[in-house]
């Protein structure tokens, strides 16, 4: 059934069908709206009258109109406001946003059937309108993309932009790490007026302004299999990832906090994760209250 504002608009344009006219006549405001129009018609006719008492009639009409319009202006303003809001809603693109919480992943199907796997604590935003000709997204956090072939596909982050035509790749933009891994096809990374092309099996990492170009033999990012993988990454950033994965607070009580870590930890068992991080570096850990952890270079 047509809504009230559509009926009013079609009535003003004299476009109502017989059934729609009946529906309009049942509106509570129908008599009021008709009166506005009739009042306008009468006023238009009367102001051209040759009646000798025109001045008196004009004064009465003005008084009547003044009183009536004081009453109806708020209602007309409300109708116009609603109509403008509907016009803006229909004719302007709407941002679609996805967010993930601790230990939450989301699978997102884009309008062109491209697939995005959004990792935890991440944010993805895009405009659905005209998506076919403007495939652009904003990413905070981490996501894996399986892109359908078509127009250029851009992933914008705070540190750089990743552009492809159709491929599989992973983008991580969190804390001091910006990392792009290409699993299929070719991707282009743009940042700070630089441009780098990554074929399948290559990774680009920017950590605290330092670039790294490495190989990857993986078919997909490990986080899709509940694993977090690191290649010569500062330990403090590894700890931040551990905190986000398990929603815990870690106190890093070691002498050399500039230590780097290469390895991986599971995202579904905190004891195993802590052992995977601490044992290769000869560190120890202690869990307090299930949510507080101390990692130190002192033996337990």
Image (tube, grey):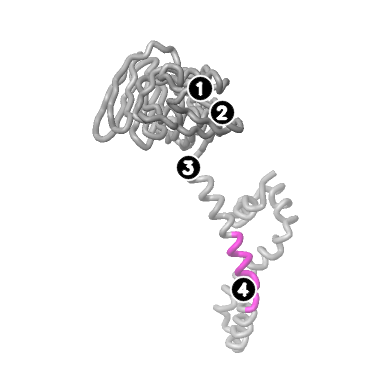
- Tell me where residue 83 appears, x and y as whole percent: 57, 55
Pointers 3 and 1 in contact (C-beta within 8 Å)? no
Q: CA distance from mark 4 to mark 3?
A: 36 Å
Residue 201 found in image quarter = top left
- Horizontal side, residue 85 vs residue 184: left or right: right
Which mark is nearer the camera, 1 or 4? 1
Q: Which residue is mark 2?
A: 287
Pointers 1 and 2 in contact (C-beta within 8 Å)? yes
Q: Is residue 274 visible?
A: yes
- Which residue range is magenta in the image? 67-79
Q: Secondary structure at mark 4?
A: helix
Q: CA distance from mark 2 to mark 4?
A: 73 Å
Which mark is nearer the camera, 2 or 4? 2
10 Å crowding of disc 1: few (<14), some (14-19), many (20+) = many
Answer with mark 2 or mark 4, whichever residue precedes in sequence.
Answer: 4
Q: Which residue is mark 3?
A: 93
| Residue 172 drawn above or below residue 56 | above
Magenta-drawn stretch contains 85 = no
Q: Is residue 111 visible?
A: no
Q: CA distance from mark 3 to mark 1?
A: 46 Å
Secondary structure character of the magenta stretch overall: helix
Pointers 1 and 4 in contact (C-beta within 8 Å)? no
- Nearest to the observer: residue 109 or residue 84: 109
Q: Which residue is mark 1?
A: 274
Q: Which residue is mark 4?
A: 69
Q: Secondary structure at mark 3?
A: loop
- At 49% from the left and 32% from the top, the residue drawn is 250
Q: CA distance from mark 1 to mark 4?
A: 74 Å
Magenta-drawn stretch contains 69 = yes
């Amino acid at each position: 059934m047509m809504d009230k504002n559509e009926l009013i608009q079609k009535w003003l344009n004299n476009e109502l069908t017989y059934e729609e006219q009946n529906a309009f006549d049942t509106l509570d405001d129908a008599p009021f709206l008709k009166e506005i129009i009739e009042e306008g018609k009468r006023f238009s006719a009367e102001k051209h009258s040759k009646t000798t008492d025109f001045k008196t009639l004009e004064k009465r009409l003005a008084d009547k109109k003044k009183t009536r319009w004081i009453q109806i202006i708020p209602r007309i303003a409300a109708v116009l406001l609603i109509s403008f809001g509907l016009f803006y809603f229909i004719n302007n693109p709407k941002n679609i946003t996805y967010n993930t919480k601790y230990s939450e992943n989301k699978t997102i199907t884009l309008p062109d059937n491209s697939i995005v796997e959004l990792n935890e604590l991440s944010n993805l935003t895009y405009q659905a309108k005209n998506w076919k000709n403007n495939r652009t997204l904003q990413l905070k956090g981490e996501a894996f993309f399986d892109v359908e072939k078509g127009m250029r596909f851009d992933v914008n982050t705070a540190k750089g932009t990743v552009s492809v035509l159709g491929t599989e790749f992973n983008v991580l933009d969190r804390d001091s790490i910006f990392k792009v891994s290409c699993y299929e096809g070719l991707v282009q990374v743009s940042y700070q007026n630089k441009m780098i092309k990554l074929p399948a099996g290559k990774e680009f990492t920017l950590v605290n302004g330092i670039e790294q170009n490495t190989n990857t033999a993986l078919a997909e990012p490990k986080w899709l299999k509940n694993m977090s993988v690191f290649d010569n990454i500062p330990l403090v950033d590894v700890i931040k990832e551990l905190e986000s994965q398990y929603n815990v607070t870690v106190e890093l009580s070691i002498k050399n906090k500039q230590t780097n870590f290469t390895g991986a930890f599971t995202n579904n068992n905190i004891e195993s994760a802590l052992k995977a991080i601490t044992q290769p570096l000869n560190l120890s850990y202690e869990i307090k209250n299930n949510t507080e952890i101390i990692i130190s270079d002192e033996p337990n």
